[in-house]
């Protein structure tokens, strides 16, 4: 169970949410475990909300209000605390990335966000949001670059990505952008001891995951989760049996991909094709 810690409730909306949840729980004479039982989650999960470790959840906040008799107070704080630089469907996964000890991602058509260059991210965002104003596009790009700085931290998670060869061949932003992007993939794969990059070749046929991005995350003191994404939508999965199924499928994808060294050689070869006049 996450032990209560003293929070300055005015440092962030999430800290205020956690401090208020703790105040209401203690006023009701409930432990974290007792409150968790009433809203069908663990005491540790409640503690992560109270300590501002985990981003508040809308459905659980509604249950907190019902159990604690707080009207819609917790739900209103939840709406404030859930504001994010990332799209709402991805915001929870982005927060969990910061806590993960391992991240395993399969990318069928695009370079994973944590490994994207600024130019690639900009071209991709512009293509996905054709009619958005420039300042909105730049806001998304900045958020993605800030997210990628996670990999520079001394306690960065182990990152294992399997990228389908199709993602290397789709010329996002044109040859110059792709050359820079693929060179970054090679550089990160060879120069970062906590990153492994593999390529799923066309010759491997249909992989276990075909149409959408899949990210498996594990944590030091919380159950593993899986995040899946398609265009303009994503889903965070925490049901243990389904997470295990995704994990086993990822192992099959990893086994069918080229070896790390052969993968980097393939990426280099494609980068050289883009660099040709």
Image (cartoon, rainbow, N blue to C red):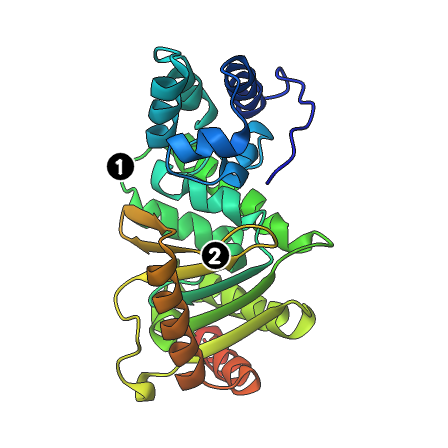
Where, by quadrant of the figure, is residue 253 drawn? bottom left
Residue at screen point 34% across, 23% down: 62
In front: mark 2 or mark 1? Answer: 2
User: Could you classify mark 2 by the number of other residues whose Cα lies within 10 Å: few (under 14), some (14-19), or many (20 or more)?
Assistant: some
Residues 195 and 2: in front is 2
Does residue 180 appear to the left or right of 245 in the view shown? right
Numbered badge on residue 87: none
Please identify the quadrant where the C terminus is shown. Answer: bottom left
Residue 57, given in percent of the width and then of the height, sits at: 40, 32
Residue 29, given in percent of the width and then of the height, sits at: 53, 18
Residues 42 and 200: in front is 42
Numbered badge on residue 224: 2
Residues 209 and 34: in front is 34
Residue 107 in sight from this viewpoint:
no
Residue at screen point 58% across, 23% down: 15
Dot 1 corresponds to which residue?
Answer: 131
């Amino acid at each position: 169970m996450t032990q209560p810690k003293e929070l300055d409730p005015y440092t962030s909306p999430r800290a205020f949410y956690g401090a208020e949840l703790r105040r209401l729980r203690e006023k009701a004479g409930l432990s974290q475990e007792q409150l968790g039982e009433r809203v069908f989650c663990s005491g540790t999960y409640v503690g992560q909300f109270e300590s501002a470790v985990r981003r508040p959840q809308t459905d659980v906040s509604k249950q907190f209000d019902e159990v604690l008799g707080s009207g819609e107070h917790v739900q209103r704080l939840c709406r404030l605390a859930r504001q994010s630089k990332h799209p709402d469907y991805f915001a929870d996964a982005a927060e969990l990335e910061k806590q993960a000890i391992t991240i395993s991602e399969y990318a069928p058509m695009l370079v994973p966000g944590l490994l994207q260059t600024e130019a690639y991210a900009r071209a991709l965002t512009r293509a996905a949001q054709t009619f958005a104003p420039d300042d909105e596009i730049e806001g998304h790009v900045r958020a993605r670059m800030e997210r990628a700085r996670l990999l520079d931290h001394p306690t960065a998670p182990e990152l294992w990505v399997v990228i389908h060869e199709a993602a290397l061949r789709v010329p996002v932003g044109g040859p110059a952008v792709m050359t820079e992007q693929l060179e970054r993939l090679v550089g990160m794969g060879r120069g970062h001891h906590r990153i492994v990059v593999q390529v799923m070749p066309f010759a491997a046929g249909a992989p276990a995951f075909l149409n959408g991005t899949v990210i498996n995350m594990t944590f030091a003191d919380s159950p593993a989760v899986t995040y899946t994404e398609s265009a303009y939508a994503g889903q965070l999965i925490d049901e243990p049996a389904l997470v295990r199924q995704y994990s086993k499928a990822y192992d099959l994808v990893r086994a069918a991909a080229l070896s790390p060294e052969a993968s980097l050689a393939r990426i280099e070869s494609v980068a050289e094709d883009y660099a040709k006049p």
